[in-house]
Image (cartoon, rainbow, N blue to C red):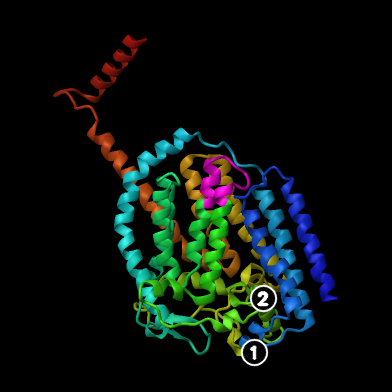
Amino acid sequence: MYELLLLASLLLFIGVCAVYARQEAASLVHPLTIYLAFHGFIFVIRPLFARFYDFDLVYRVYDFLPSIDDKITVILGANLAMLVFAFASLRTAGVPVGRTPPPTEFEDLRRRLTVPIVITTALLAPFAISSQLSNWSRRVDPLATMARDAGTGIMVNVNANGWYTDSALILAPLAVFAVWLLRYRATGWVIFAIASTLMLGSGGRGSFIFAATAIMIVFLLERGRRWFDLRIAALGAIALLLFNAVVLDRGEAVRSIFGAGDGYTASTVHDLDPLEHMDFANLEYFEFVVYAVPQRTGSWDYFAHNLQIFTEPVPRALWPDKPVGSPVKYFELWDYGTPIGMTISLPGAGWMSLGYFGIAVYAAFFALIYGWIYRRLLVHSGTAISILAYALLAATSIVVFRDGLLLTLLRQLPFYFGPFLLVLLLARLMTARASTHFQPAETPGETPADRRRALAASASDRR
């Protein structure tokens, strides 16, 4: 029965992709393309590997075993999320990308943003690099600044500030700016490589994947291409290889190059079957959620976990008694296993909230968010600056789909999109200052009415 369901899921996925490919909005930069890539790998291809190799790593670590009904529910729920997301995103963003700005518009934007980007980089890069190097040290001794809450299993800061720790993410958009500003030339890729080394050395993969994805998107949109480009395909392949390498040793190889290694070995990871490691285990994480909610918890979450968006921004140093996780909870998943490092995915978060109905709500919600961004920036606007903005926003969706949390989106924005807003602010201030500097001087005794009459007379003479 389960094997037939996996086959049906594969056929359904192929069918949805075929229908989508015939839509005029279909392109590599569309939000649905990103979600289909996520769904296809996590909930279509990997379940086949899991069945063939009989994956059991997460079951052993989490100390649970899903029933066949749980596994069937996961596949059905994942496909429901795919169908709802596809329908909602095409309803919201069912038109193709608007005008492709001419190369001169991008060159003009580069000239206007060069100084603001340089200033932004000079202001933010020292903090980002310092934070990233601190994360290298934290990887060696994670308990020096973090502690795991016994009741929830959530890692919390005890001696560090979360805003400072996460400021390491700023390296990602700065790397995107460098590659774009330098017109995808070798110099820009050298800067990208340096930033990637810092990002990957901490064992983090999300910021690196964000940067690579944003560069792919802005490159395709700038060149007016809907699908693949050889250079983009090469970048994607390199990104996947580096991602897999960091998965295996959590950045130990990178840190060792600079003498900051900790002797970490990943022999247990190397002994796993293909795709079994926990970075791709959203299938098993979703199964754990179905295993627990509501069968053992006796309750749904009713979307209460989203309330954490109100407490998350406050540093624990200023609020020592800040709740761990959401301030309102109907259950603790740690009462039913040991879900260390769990990312429950979009359909998993929906199920935890309110079953199949929650899955539909979550899929529609995020489809509308990213669909609106697509329509607003690429269809209604279609300027060079809106394309750059879209690349930075769309690239956040990968981690959002993996985590399935609104909190994840809001947590990323200050660090991935904030530097872009600072660049725009500086550009506006510089433009305003230039306009004021070159404003014609007033003639002594001249009134505003006199100036208007003089301008009108000058215009009449020209005619």
Vertically, is 175 above or below 267?
A: above
Residue range highlighted in magenta = 216-232
Regarding residue 188, the answer to whether it shows in the image is yes
Rendered location of residue 314, percent (x, y): 40, 72
* Residue 67 locus on image (x, y percent): 76, 84
Q: Residue at x 50, y 66 (%)?
A: 206
Residue 256 part of the magenta-drawn span = no
Expressed as whole percent of the image width and height from the top left, the position of residue 271 reads 61, 82
Q: Is residue 327 left or right of residue 1?
A: left
Numbered mark located on residue 286 in the image? 2
Q: Secondary structure at mark 2?
A: helix
Q: In this view of the protein, which residue sits in the foreground, 105 or 344?
A: 105
Residue placed furthest toward the front: 257
Mark 2 vs mark 1: give the one in front: 1
Q: Quadrant of the N terminus?
A: bottom right
Asked if residue 188 is positioned above or below residue 49 in the image, the reply reads: above
Compared to residue 196, the image places residue 227 above or below, namely above
Question: What is the C-alpha distance between the residues marked 2 and 1?
Answer: 14 Å
Q: Quadrant of the C terminus?
A: top left
* Residue 319 coordinates in the image, percent (x, y): 37, 79
Identify the residue under disc 1. 63
Vertical side of 31 occupied by 455: above or below: above
Which corner quadrant of the image does residue 95 belong to? top right
Q: Amino acid at mark 2?
A: Phe
